[in-house]
Structure formats: structure tokens, C-alpha cells
Image (cartoon, helix red, strand yellow):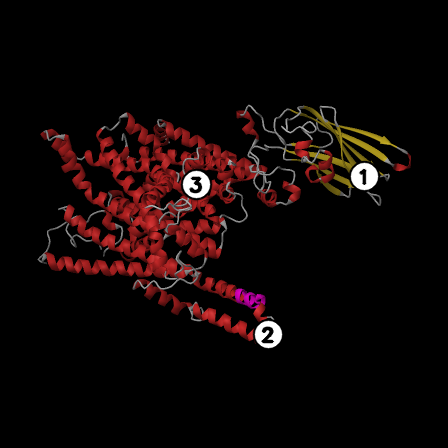
Amino acid sequence: MGSVAEDVTPTVEKKKSSSNSTFTRVIKYSGFRLLSLFVTVVIGIYLTIMIANMGGYVDQMMKAEIQERITMQIQMNPAFKNLDPAEKTRLTEERIQNEIERLDLDQPLAIRSARFLKNALTMNLGRAQHMTSDSGSRNVRLIILERLPYTLLLMGTSQLILFFSTLFIALALSRKYGSFWDKVVIALSPTSAIPAWFYGIFLILIFAAILRILPFGGVIDAPVPDDFLGRALSVLKHLILPASAWIISTFPLSIYNWRTFFLIYSSEDYVDTAKAKGIPAREIERKYILRPTLPTIITSFALLLIGVWTGATILETVFNWPGLGRVIFKAIGLYDTPVIVGTTIIYAYLLAATVFLLDFVYALVDPRVKIGSGGKS
Amino acid sequence: MKNFISTFREILKYPSAIFGSLVVLALVVASIIVVVKIPYSEAINIWRGGEEIVGKNPRTVPPIWYNWFRKDKLVVSLDMVEGDEGVTVEETVTEGGTNIKTTTFEFDYQYNSFPQDLVFYFTSTYQDKQPFASVKIFTPDEREIKAGSFAIGTTHTYPLNQDDKLRKKLDGVVPNIGLFIQEGDEAQKVVQGVYKIQVELITFEKDSTAQAEFVMHGQVFGWAGTDHLRRDLTLPMLWGIPIALAFGLIAAMGTSILTMIIAAVGTWYGGFIDGLIQRITEINMVIPFLPILIMIGTFYSRSIWVILGATVALSIFTGAIKNYRATFMQIKESTYIEAAKAYGAKDNRIIFRYLVPRIIPLLLPGLVSSVPGFVFLEASLALLGLGDPVLPTWGKTINEAYGNAALYRGWYYWILQPAALLMITGLGFASLGFALDRVFNPRLRGM
């Protein structure tokens, strides 16, 4: 049986493959894997839908809210002032009924949740119940797409910088194990226990409140500069603090982890043998350390890329950055199930697809791995 | 025991471990003292109390230790009642039960700036005739300023800044400034020296009494300053310690121990149970962690204990369970387990007496290292406005400061104090966890 996280460790071939041809084995394995991943996604999404409704509890709240809002609307509206009370009641009832029908609240939760699930799985994200995009659309796809670039900009930039810089620094440090900088990294690694938003507050304090050289938050200056270059520079200026906060918080621990990882691999016997043979250090690094660690590096990179999707709700809150994390937070505040489910399903699909593809990537980069063989029960 | 001592010695080789243990120890001691000295109900009462509790505090002022680092001292808040130093009382009894009590408040004013306000609080007891109070101020430059005179009820508050008559007497300058400058001084230079405030309380009945209390709302207050609702921030700073520790430790322990036991059970029985645990873990990876917590906080309950339970439940089936499983797999094959099976040990005995103890050295560093994550999670949720509605915590303080644009308006203490405490707590546990990891994890030894 396949699994989401097992494949972080490559399935190493244990016995010689049987008479099955590679092709049928791969097909069989892929089919099985896809099925199991799909079932996982379905259950995960359904649970999310149920939690987003608190098992029907949210329905009660929404109905009460509709009742109150519409009664108030009709009471306050001067146009209905002279309306006969019975007529007014009828009108109120009718409007409440319309609103309940619009939001599908007259259907039992079981049916509605099944519909949510079907729409989610077919990526038919539908329309939001309360939220609108900045351009005024109720389309969930538009709401998400509108915010996606900001999240990609912030998280993508910082994650990519983090990944490559920490990897190379760690490699360099593992070479000079025990040096001054190595010790500095070890000493600093506990600081990564502090989350990014926390560093964000300090950065705002220093660079925005005291020095007044960078903005407190937001994504662009107001008024928006006219030319493209001005706009780009303005966005860049707003990007510096949140991106730095993210990088600072993860940097030491990330280097520490990679460095320790490389050190463990460089104490393998075959590395010693290679050294004894007199192979140059660069080549040892490339062939005997980086090569076997490649699956782990790729996994970490892939998970990092899909991790970008969820954004960083709290960092975005602190910096008032209009990314996806804020959208999810806002959607929850408005009980907007379609938006919550929409963001979740995309993440779930991305995760499942990545996990599925990683199996094949392992087989490509690591000759010890053979797809579908030596599988676990 | 010998083993334990040698492990302990090993740990003490790491300076970070010493730092971490000291921090953790200090936090534990501090939280015990706080919970004993300020019981829960009293803390809630102080934090959510009304005017009668917070009224005597100035609004959004920094803590008094700001003055240690300043040449130009900020005005320290004063609260004087009868019997305090600088307060003298003279009583003259006349016939017919009329009693004149003169309370003089004296204070040395050596600042270059002005207090927020000067407020008098009167309390009295009487049958029919209300006591009468009049306030006079003597400044160091020999001015004698008559402020209000009025009848007082059982309680009466007299803030000088709201006295328009007094303001007119001071050429239209607000009393908290006007009283401290020379008349007509445009530059508003403070006249330093001893100020005397004379409060005359006249009671007209035999058993009637009256007291006056003088409060000067300064520019610094208490050990942690005050917030926008005049609440003393010392309370959330102190009560934040036990709450953060309780949340962090319970969540970390609950998660690690449950994860370990579930992994052990799964590995031992294998088959269906093991498969089920694996599947649950995979599903849990699809479910978004933070949004789920936000949903529970928004829709269901913001109580810290509900959030704690949800956090533990969502944190059990994660990557950690796979790590434990891998280790248990190895242990399961060892010979002493075989021996236990051979002498007919029950499943429970093998799991809890043979499997689980072997993994505790692995569990401990992970447990300690995960504490900061949970402490900050509580703060993060509070920052999103989902903090516990009743308890004063560090995260909620930061949230309120943020909501009032504290950084923008220069009220840095409001954010920096809880932030510093959070950081010390986080770093303490993280350093200790790292050191433990390096001691207990044989692969990391010497790296």
C-alpha cells in the first residue's frame, strides 16, 4: 500500500524483481498508488468540510444570523414603513426563505456536504457565500487567483532564497566541520523556535517605527506609482521586511539540519574508501555525498514548493499582506465554506500529486530505487 | 542512578543546556509563585475589573524602569492617602459637630514634563448632611490656586483636568500643565520644587467621616506600564508565565506521549491497526492544521483548553509517528523482546515495560524542543484575535497592542515586554531541547 509520507524514504529494492515486466509493474503500482492517494484526499476533504460546518452547528448560527439581518433590514427600510404588519411578516418570511435557499441551508447537511465534496473533487470551486474578490466577484476561483500572486511573491521568494542559500552554506560548513562558523550556526539554531511573525514585529519596530526607512506593512505605496518601475520598486520595498522575517526565522535551523544531514552521510564507509583512494574532495562531495542525499533534497524542495500554497496566515496578518493566508482567515470569519474548501482541495491535490510524482523522481535519480518493488504492506 | 548522573554530567557540558535549564527552572518557580500569590479568580477580577480597579492608573504609559535609562526623568505616578509619607492631617472640632479636617499632600516635583492628570477621590459616611470639600494648591513659586469646592457623596471623584473653572483661572491652560508652569509662560517651562495640595473636608454631623485620596497620573507606572484601558500590564506579564508553561508543556507532553504509545501499539500488533494508524496519519497531512484551529476558535470555543485539546489531537498523527514507528520496528526485532515473548509476557506488558521505555531517550529531546512551538502557537492564535476570552496572556497583550497600533504610536513597551518573555521562554526550551538531542541521539554525538 502506498502512503503519503513513507516515500520520503525511498523504497529500496529487497529482492530481485519477479517475472513481471517493468511496464506492468509500474502501471499496477501507479494505479494502486493513485487510488490510495485519492481516497486519502477524499476523506481529508470531507473531514475539512464537516469541521467547517462544525457538524451542522454553523448552520444554526447562519440561520439565526439571516433571520436577524433580514428582519432588521425590513424594519429599518422606510419604504416598508406604512406596510400592513401581516404583509410585513409575510415579506420577512419570504426573504428569509429566499436567503436560506440561496445558501442551500434548507438542505440537510449530509446532502450539502456531499455536494461540497463532489464540487471540490471536480475542482468546481463555485461561488463564495459572502466573500467577494477585490474586483467584486463572488467566484471562488477569482478570489483565490487574485491573492495567489501576492502569496507566491512573498513565500516563493523567501522559500527559494532560503532553500538554496541554506543548502550551499550547509555544504560548505559540513566541509569545515567544527570551525568557528559551524559553532555559530549550532549556537544560533535554537532561535528558529521563534516564528517568523515574531521576528516580523521586531523588524517593524526597528525599520518602520524607529528608523522609518521601510513601510509598516501592506503591499504597495498609496498613491500607487504610475510607471511600472515605480510600482515594482514599491512592492519590493514592502516585500523586504516580511520576507526577511521569514528567512531569519528559518535560516539557522535549516542550515543546522542540512549540515548534520550531510555530516551523517559523509561519515559513511564508502566515503572513507573514496577518500582513501585519493579522489578529490569536490568529486567525493558530488558523487558520494550529494548523489545519495538527492532524494531527500528533492523531497524537501517539493514539499517546500507546495508549502508556499498555504501562505503564512499570521505573518500576512502582522504585515497586512493580502495573501492567501489572509483569505482563508477571512473566509473562516465569514463562515464561507466554499472558499475554505476551495483552498484546502487545491492544497490536497498539490500534495497528492507531488507525493505521486516523487516516487518516479526517486527512481530516476537513485538507481537503488525501483518503482513498485519491495513495497511495504 | 549512576547512568543518570553521567548523563546529567554530559548535559552540563553544553552551555546552552545550562542556560535552557536555568530559564525553565526560573519559569516554573515564577509560575508557582504567581499562581499562589495572585489566585486565578483574583487575577481575572483585576484584569476584567472596572473603573474602581483601573481608574487610578494612567492610560498607556511605559513602566517605571524606563526612567533608569533616561536622563530626563518621566513623571512617576503618585497615589497618596492618609498615613502615607508626605501626607499630614489636621483636625479641628467646632461645637455643634462640625469638623474641619485639613489633609495636605506634599510632593517634590523635579521633572521637565507634565503628568497626565491630577485626580482626587473622596469617600465619606454621613446621615443627612453631605460633607463639603475644597481643594487648594500651593506651588513652589508662591502661587496659591483655589480649585473646586463642592459637596461630596459617599464616593466622589474630582479630576482636575475636567474642571473648567480652574482652567479659566489658569489662563485657559489645561490644569495638568497650567499648575506646573508660571502664569502666562508661553514656553511652558516646569516650575520645579515642592507642591502642596491642601484638601479641606468639612463634616457636619457627629459620626460623619470623610477621606481624600490624591492620585497623580504620571508618565510611567508600575513594572510593566499600562494599556489603553488603564490596566496594569504587570498582571498579564506575570500570569502569562503559568499559562504559557501549562499550554506548552501539556501540549508537548500530551502529543509526544500519545504519539509514542499509539506508535508502539501499532507496531506491536501490526496488521490492521498499524495500517489504520498509517492511513489516519496520511489523512491528517491533507487537513490544514492552522485553518482547522482557527475554525474551532471562531465557530466553537475560544477557551484555551478546547484549543489545547484540538492541538494535541491534530499533532499526534504527524511525521513523528512514522519516526517512532521506524524505531519501534528495530526494537521489536531485538532478542530481549523475543525472550519476553518466550516467557509468555502479555502484550500490554511488552508494550509498556519493554518497548516504550527504550524510546524515552529519543522522546525527551523531541518533547522539550516542541514546547516553544506550542507556546508560540497560543500566541499566534491570540494574535489572530482567537485568544482565550478570559485569561490574560502574552499573546493577547501583543494582539491588543497591535490592535491599538502600539508600534506606530511609539508604545513599544506594550509589545516588547510580552515579546521578550515569549522569546526567553522559547529560547530556553529550544536550547535545552537541542542539547538533549545531542546527548541522547548517538548519531549526533560529537557533531
Pair 3/1: label in front: 3
Q: How far across and how far down the image is residue B79, in percent?
A: 67, 33
Q: Is residue B346 a member of the stretch shown in magenta? A: no
Disc 3 target residue: A216
Disc 2 target residue: A83
Q: How far across and how far down the image is residue B340, in percent?
A: 29, 46
Q: Quadrant of residue B430?
A: top left
Q: Are marks 3 and 2 on the same chain?
A: yes
The answer to which of A265 and A306 lies nearer the viewer is A306
Label 2 sits on what residue type?
Leu
Q: How far across and how far down the image is residue B103, in percent?
A: 77, 31
Residue in the picture at 59% in, 74% down: A83
Mark 3 and mark 1 residues within 8 Å of each other at the beta carbon: no
**In the rendering, which numbered label is found on residue A57?**
none
Q: Is the residue A207 above or below the residue A345 in the image?
A: above
Q: In screen coordinates, is B341 left or right of A341?
A: left
Q: Are marks 1 and 2 on the same chain?
A: no
Q: Is residue A69 a member of the stretch shown in magenta? A: yes
Specify start and end residues of the magenta stretch as a single range.
A68-77
Q: CA distance from mark 3 to mark 1?
A: 53 Å
Q: CA distance from mark 3 to mark 2?
A: 52 Å
